[in-house]
Amino acid sequence: MKEILLKYMTAFTSLSEIEQQEIAEAVVLEEYQKGFYLIKQGDVPTSKCYFALKGCVREYYVDESGKEITSNFYTEEQAILSFNFQEQDQASNYSLICLEDCILIVGNLDNEKDMYRKYPQLETMTRKMMEIYLGEAQGEFSAFIHATPEERYKTILKKRPHLVNRVPQHQLASYLGMTPESLSRIKKRINNEYLGS
């Protein structure tokens, strides 16, 4: 599993093979079972961050009416970041739950500072990965806002087709900003168009 981390170090740094191996040995790999909460809405924010090597993690929150709203799914080779960890007097705004058995690299911001001091290129790699992640997230959010429900679903089919079979339909519908019934109609229409072509 650590080969994925080595791939990123090779792509974004000029660290020697020995340094890459040292870092790979120092990172913490954790296995979590399906249904495990990395954090729950209302918990004290954590300074932990994660990088998915295997599995699927769902990010969601419960709104004022008690409805669960899915805000993201994280799968292989995606970073799972905690943005409100510095606000220790505030509760977490969301929950992170493993939808599948997961293997995650677990980072702690305090430990990462030590690693960055020892391997400055590691910080550069993290920054580059963050820039790519935030750029993609900004582009996806902008496109999402302007898209129709059907366009949103087609984007998922194009960019993240594995999600369609990996997550429950009602959670996927929530993520796409529609009801499960609307998603069923859209899927049926698209399947009919595909079969008719």
Image: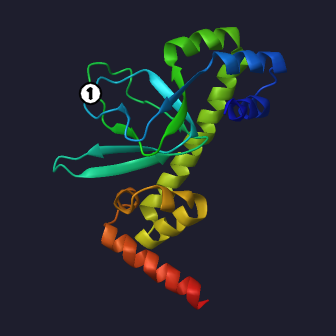
Q: Please state which amino acid type lies under the numbered disc 1.
A: Ala
Residue 196 rendering spot, x and y as whole percentages: 57, 91
Q: Residue at x 42, y 30 (%)?
A: 83
Q: Residue at x 34, y 61 (%)?
A: 170
Q: Residue at x 34, y 65 (%)?
A: 178
Question: Which residue extends farthest left?
Answer: 65
**In front of the other: 113 or 144:** 113
Left or right position of 128 against 57: right
Q: Label 1 neighbourhood size at 10 Å, few (<14), some (14-19), many (20+)?
A: some
Residue 132 rendering spot, x and y as whole percentages: 63, 40
Residue 125 rendering spot, x and y as whole percentages: 68, 27
Above or below 11: residue 172: below
Looking at the rendering, which quadrant does residue 36 occupy?
Answer: top left
Q: Residue at x 65, y 21 (%)?
A: 123
Residue identified by numbered label 1: 91
Inspect this view and state whether residue 16 appears. Answer: no
Left or right position of 197 against 189: right
